[in-house]
Image: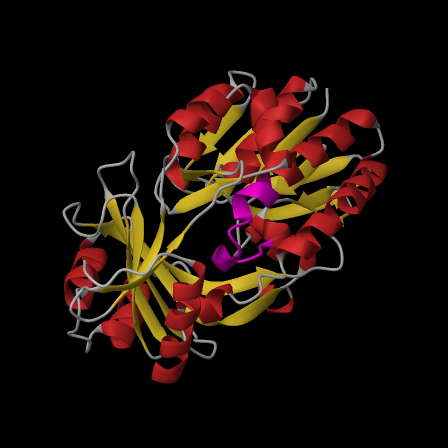
Amino acid sequence: MTEVLVVGASIAGQTLAYWLARHGMRATLVERAPRLRTGGNGVDLRDEATEVAERMGIMPRVRAAAADVRGMKFVDAADRAVARVNMSRNGEIEIMRGDLVALLHEVTGPEVEYVFGDSVRSMEEDGGGVTVSFEGGSTRRFDLVVGADGLHSSVRRLAFGPEEGALRHMGHYFAFANADSALGEDRWVTMYNLPGKMAGLYRSGNHAQAKAYFIFRSEPLAYDHRDVGQHRTLLTEAFGGETSWRVRELLDGALADPDFYFDALSQVRLPSWSSGRVALVGDAAYCASPASGAGAELAVVGAYRLAEELAGTSDHRVAFRRYEEGHRELVKRKQQIGPNVRMMVPKTHLGMWARNGLALGMGLVARSS
């Protein structure tokens, strides 16, 4: 039986583990966090990703848990809506990341071994497999290793080199956190802009908990991506002096949230997604950035394709090549994110005025909150 170590228990990792088990392979899923990470923002399932979810039997529950957001609105400092843009889903479904992660965990089944609170420290590959040493002190042997451990993948660093060679900074930083559920309009994303900055509220129709989010323009910043205290300092430096709209209130709530999340808007660009017996899937291989709205789609489809190719041949080199050939075009399309970030975070007051005019032409005008 082929034994595969999957590193990272998020969307890509759990989808991959599910399909590996379905094909008779043994999947061990290791996650650095002590439990499932159930926070995060809304993610979209569409097209082939919904087909994969249907085959997994989770689509009825995905639909039941859908975020049910009608659209986004832009507000001024007095909280008056200057424009609304209705969101036409056309078959795609938005679900909170944590809800999807929990659903995937429920269907992976006892065939998948979960190891929480640990991660890979080193890997030594030879002709017959990979010897993996874990940060917790144990050592185990696997036929293959797949990194599904996100933008700052440890597996990618060990097998492909420093992340600086893989990441493409997109000129912005963002943060997500829980917010006061009384804030914002139900079933709408509310955005407030200052030049080069945006603070917002996300209110799902099926969730009592509101979400706060922040984006600001910046050249690359030097910080430790695991140092949450440092992340809070960076967000405070960007928004701490702002007193208009609800920025101060949202910032205070975000900084106090234990699930606070901060990172750069970045993409991962690699010439290959495999090296020897090690492969990458999801954000670790081809993050398109949160601004693309395609992270979950790429993760689900990519994980499914990788498992299918591994099941179709006994030669992992052939499987990895076919996986990449079959998935590259979709990744290429989704990494071309167009004007999304410029629309959300205009550089100047003039840019904000022009954006609002464009939004008025796209959506429904509203002059009162």
The image quarter in which residue 53 lies: top right
Q: Residue at x 53, y 70 (%)?
A: 170
In this rendering, is residue 213 above or below 280? Answer: below
Q: Which residues are magenta?
A: 287-299
Camera-nearest residue between 351 and 264: 351
Residue drawn at x 15%, y 69% as measured from the top left: 78
* 295 magenta-colored: yes
Q: Quadrant of the N terminus?
A: top right
Q: Is residue 328 magenta?
A: no
Total marks placed:
0
Q: Nearer the viewer, residue 358 or 121?
A: 358
Q: Position of residue 84 (x, y in %)?
A: 34, 58
Q: Position of residue 23 (x, y in %)?
A: 70, 19
Does any portion of residue 301 appear in the rendered image? Answer: yes
State the residue at coordinates (59%, 37%).
300
Residue 322 quadrant: top right
Q: Is residue 98 left or right of residue 5?
A: left
Residue 329 image position (x, y, % from top left)? 74, 51
Left or right: 126, with 348 as reference point: right
Residue 154 image offset from top left, x and y in percent: 55, 52
Q: Quadrant of the C terminus?
A: bottom left
